[in-house]
Image: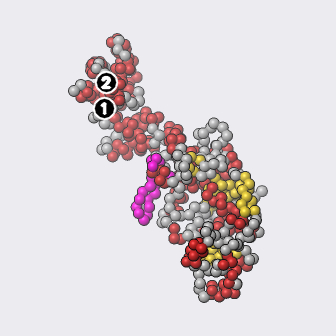
């Protein structure tokens, strides 16, 4: 068996959609599992759609995610060039082979003529039923076609598809897919206007010359596969194995995941933040939003595939070891935002705490607060269990640096009863007398003091917590007093008693 070789071939037309990331990830897992190669190819035959910075964006995204390529644009290799715009002469050679073999033909129909044909014939497509009344080398004759070309008339080259043939694609995910060639149109393979091929010819030629053995791509390309199979056969080449991945669906499951869904539900659909070079519009990215690359990879890997057991948290190596393309689902995979956050929460607990320190320091700086990394790290360690994203830290723990000016209504209703001011005032007096302010010592003494009063611990301590935090939330109360210190803790508590007693 030939060495496994797969490819990811994006077009540099803008930011990389998260669905494209999953497609590349599956190619990467398949290649690594089989000891094969992953090729990075750029499909830029449509120069009108080129967007400056898009190619570098794509490379940076995969570098962040830890998805490594073996050859291709920016990686080298002996089967290049790997950018399609640099392969014009190669494509011309193969267009010529199809024309010489009578498996393709020249067509000179203008946009106006094609539009007239569409109006005349409902559901018009350029095929065996209609090509005989169009302006092409089949109806005009080859000599006339060559005369028109010599005179400078623009043309395209179309693939000649014979009707009535069942084309079978053995898909690794979907099994046998059979389509009759009668429903296929004579696709344009080459355009003289820019001397470039269309996607259909270029990717077939490139896959063959780059010795691609498996084509793993999105479901949206499934209708093109019979055409591609016919092209392989027209050249007399062995076709690769195909696998068409299920669509990524919107969170509600109704249609393909789009940027509009991300905007609606508040999550990114791009791996990195993207600034449109034309409009200046900024779209959020997973990296800048505080998602960890390990979480994104783990989550995406399980959108349309699972290892067959209850194991969900998996490293890249574990994914490589267990991935099986044939066990991918045929059905679309719903993008579960809560599950994505769950994965990020898990990996956040294991990550280098400097990530959390940096995020919290940025918010402290924005609020004009100078603090040491050591103290910020202390709070990050206390609070990380309570957040899914680093940016949520400030909301959860701002009270460590900012005394409450308002108090949560639900917390007051539950814990600030008539006797609460008495409890807190008495507790403050007791705490004032304590020389050892360490939480580990203070906790035992406070519990003994509350017991001596025969008061309910929950009523006293939750009322005290509200005065320090502004709500009945936060970490262990003596961790809070440890950080605030004696003076600030008592100042907050006494001021709150005064404020809430008015």
Q: Is residue 190 above or below residue 30?
A: below
Say few, some or many: other residues with alpha carbon within 10 Å of mark 1 (under 14 / 14 to 19 / 20 or more): some
Res 216 → quadrant: bottom right
CA gap between label 1 and label 2 equals 10 Å
- Please indicate, yes or no, whether residue 71 appears anywhere in the rendered image: yes
Let me know if residue 267 is in the magenta part: yes
427 with respect to 213 (left or right): left
Residue 272, image x, y percentages: 48, 54
Q: Is residue 197 above or below residue 302?
A: below
Let me know if residue 409 is in the magenta part: no
- Whether residues under marks 1 and 2 lie with C-beta atoms below 8 angstroms apart, the answer is yes
Residue 393, image x, y percentages: 41, 39
Extreme left residue here?
502
How many callouts does the rendering have?
Answer: 2
Residue at image point 48% right, 63% down:
53
Q: Which residue is mark 1?
A: 407
Q: Nearer the viewer, residue 267 or 93?
A: 267
Q: Which residue is mark 2?
A: 416
Q: Nearer the viewer, residue 305 or 210?
A: 305
SS at circle 1: loop
Report the magenta residues as a range. Answer: 264-285
Residue at image point 31% right, 21% down:
417
- Please indicate, yes or no, whether residue 301 appears anywhere in the rendered image: no
453 with respect to 289 (left or right): left
Res 126 → quadrant: bottom right
Q: Main secondary structure of the magenta part?
A: loop
């Amino acid at each position: 068996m030939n060495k496994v070789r797969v490819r990811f071939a994006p077009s540099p037309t803008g930011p990389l959609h998260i669905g494209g990331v999953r497609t590349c990830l599956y190619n990467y897992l398949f290649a690594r599992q089989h000891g094969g190669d992953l090729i990075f190819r750029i499909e830029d035959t449509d120069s009108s759609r080129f967007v400056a910075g898009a190619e570098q964006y794509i490379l940076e995204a995969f570098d962040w995610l830890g998805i490594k390529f073996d050859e291709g644009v920016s990686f080298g290799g002996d089967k290049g060039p790997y950018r399609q715009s640099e392969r014009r002469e190669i494509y011309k050679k193969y267009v010529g082979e199809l024309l010489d073999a009578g498996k393709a033909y020249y067509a000179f129909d203008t946009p106006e003529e094609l539009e007239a044909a569409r109006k005349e014939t409902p559901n018009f497509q350029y095929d065996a039923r209609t090509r005989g009344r169009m302006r092409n080398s089949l109806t005009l004759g080859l000599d006339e076609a060559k005369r028109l070309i010599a005179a400078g008339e623009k043309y395209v080259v179309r693939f000649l598809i014979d009707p009535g043939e069942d084309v079978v694609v053995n898909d690794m995910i979907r099994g046998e897919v059979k389509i009759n060639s009668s429903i296929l149109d004579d696709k344009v393979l080459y355009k003289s206007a820019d001397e470039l091929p269309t996607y259909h010819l270029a990717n077939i030629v490139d896959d063959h010359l780059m010795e691609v053995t498996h084509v793993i791509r999105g479901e949206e390309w499934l209708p093109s596969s019979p055409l591609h199979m016919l092209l392989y056969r027209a050249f007399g080449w062995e076709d690769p194995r195909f696998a068409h991945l299920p669509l990524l669906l919107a969170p509600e499951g109704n249609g393909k995941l789009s940027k509009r869904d991300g905007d609606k539900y508040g999550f990114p659909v791009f791996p990195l933040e993207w600034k449109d070079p034309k409009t200046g519009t900024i779209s959020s990215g997973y990296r800048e939003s505080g998602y960890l690359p390990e979480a994104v990879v783990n989550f995406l890997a399980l959108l349309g595939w699972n290892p067959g057991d209850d194991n969900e948290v998996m490293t890249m190596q574990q994914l490589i070891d267990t991935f099986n393309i044939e066990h991918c689902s045929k059905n679309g995979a719903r993008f579960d935002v809560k599950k994505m956050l769950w994965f990020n929460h898990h990996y956040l607990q294991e990550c280098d705490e400097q990530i959390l320190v940096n995020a919290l320091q940025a918010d402290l700086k924005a609020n004009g607060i100078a603090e040491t990394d050591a103290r910020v790290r202390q709070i990050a360690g206390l609070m990380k269990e309570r957040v899914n994203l680093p940016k949520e830290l400030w909301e959860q723990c701002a009270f460590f640096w900012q005394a409450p000016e308002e108090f949560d209504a639900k917390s007051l209703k539950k814990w600030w009863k008539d006797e609460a001011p008495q409890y807190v005032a008495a507790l403050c007096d007791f705490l004032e007398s304590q020389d050892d302010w360490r939480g580990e010592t203070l906790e035992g003494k406070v519990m003994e003091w509350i017991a001596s009063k025969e008061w309910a611990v929950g009523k006293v301590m939750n009322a005290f917590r509200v005065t320090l935090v502004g709500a009945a939330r936060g970490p262990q109360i003596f961790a809070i007093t440890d950080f605030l210190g004696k003076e600030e803790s008592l100042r907050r508590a006494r001021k709150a008693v005064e404020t809430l007693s008015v």
